Image (tube, rainbow, N blue to C red):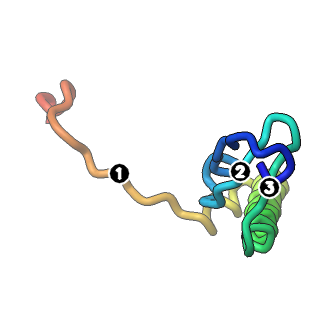
């Protein structure tokens, strides 16, 4: 730590951001050059993803049938043996 000289822990901010921050148990979080900008970008990406999710959710509840027609689900390929195959 720049303030107390103790060893700091390193942690991946938000578990999946890819930004490694240094944490002093007494003096908080320390960022290296450029890490603040990376964290801000991660926040922007999260906000865009949340807004997109909310739009899709609102569209679904407004008209579920239209949503299903405009968002087709891929057909899943059957794997393996199904008990009911013997009746075909």
The image quarter in which residue 37 lies: bottom right
81 to the left or right of 52? left
Q: Is residue 14 above or below residue 67?
A: above
Tag on residue 68?
none
> Is residue 63 visible to us here?
no
Percent position (x, y) of residue 40? 81, 68
State left or right for residue 76 relative to residue 53. Answer: left
Q: Which mark is residue 76?
A: 1
What is the distance, in whole Å, between disc 1 and disc 2 at their CAs?
45 Å
* Residue on which disc 3 sits: 30
Give above or below for 41 relative to 5: below
Nearer-the-camera pick, 83 or 46: 46
Binning the other alpha carbons within 10 Å of mark 2 as few (below 14), some (14 to 19) or many (20 upward) gives: some
Cα–Cα span, label 3 and label 1: 47 Å
Residue 33 horizontal/vertical position (percent)? 74, 73
> In terms of secondary structure, where does tag 1 sit?
loop
Residue lying at the far top of the rendered structure: 83
Disc assigned to residue 22: 2
Q: Position of residue 54 (x, y in %)?
A: 81, 57
Residue lying farthest to the left in this orientation: 86
Q: Residue at x 80, y 54 (%)?
A: 2
Query: Tags 2 and 3 in contact by the CB under 8 Å rule?
Result: yes
């Amino acid at each position: 730590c720049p303030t107390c000289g103790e060893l700091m822990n390193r942690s991946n901010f938000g578990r999946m951001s890819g930004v490694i921050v240094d944490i002093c148990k007494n003096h908080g979080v320390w960022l290296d050059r450029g890490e603040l900008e990376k964290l801000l970008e991660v926040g922007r990406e999260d906000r865009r993803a949340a807004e997109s999710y909310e739009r899709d959710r609102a569209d679904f509840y407004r008209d579920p049938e239209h949503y299903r027609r405009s968002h087709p689900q891929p057909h899943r390929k059957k794997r393996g043996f199904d008990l009911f195959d013997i009746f075909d």
